[in-house]
Image (tube, rainbow, N blue to C red):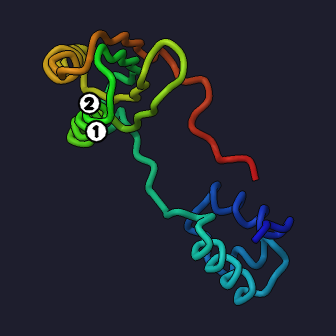
Amino acid sequence: MSLDETDSRLLAALQKNAHLTAQELGETLLLSPSQAGRRRQRLESEGYIEGYRAKLNPERLGLAVQGFIQVHLGTHGPEYSASFARLLATRAEIVSAWTMTGDADYLLRVYCADLPSLNRLIHDVLLPHSAVAKVHSQIVMDQLKHDGPLPT
């Protein structure tokens, strides 16, 4: 099913504030609370809305270093990819991971307490993996634009 303009506005509003009640959504969308609530439920059941999360402040949690790590595999194959994916899943400091085209095979986004923690992640966790040939890390100096809402 395709989205109409009201659905798009509803999704945009929820991306700004996921705590909006049916009453508040209705006021924003010029719908009754029950209509707004039904639209929200439909968008959830159809998979447009995958869930709701709290956005935490990494600095308040003691995570002073944000970085990106490019991982280059020396050995390829389904078993190595699966093994590497299992390794990534065990590490809380790796908050997202992508397979990539281009030079690197993977791009990891990480949050660490400090530079020694980042160093340990690279040298004690990633590099020892049998498929990993090299890594290239980049430390975030400042984030100019935070993860924003998806265009609707």
Q: Nearer the viewer, residue 111 or 107?
A: 107
Q: Nearer the viewer, residue 15 or 125?
A: 125
Question: Residue at coordinates 78% horizontally, 87% vertically from top-left?
Answer: 32
Q: Which image quadrant is residue 40 in? A: bottom right
Residue 121 image offset from top left, x and y in percent: 21, 22
| Label 2 Cα neighbours within 10 Å, binned few <14 / some 14-19 / many ≥20 | some
Question: Residue at coordinates 28% horizontally, 38% vertically from top-left?
Answer: 82
Q: Quadrant of the N terminus?
A: bottom right
70 is higher (above) or lower (below) than 151:
above
Question: Residue at coordinates 37% horizontally, 12% vertically from top-left?
Answer: 137
Question: Residue at coordinates 17% horizontally, 14% vertically from top-left?
Answer: 123
Amino acid type indicated by mark 2: Tyr
Label of residue 82 in the image: 1
25 is higher (above) or lower (below) than 68:
below
Circle 2 residue: 80
133 is higher (above) or lower (below) than 60:
above
Q: Is residue 120 left or right of residue 24?
A: left
Residue 44 image offset from top left, x and y in percent: 58, 72
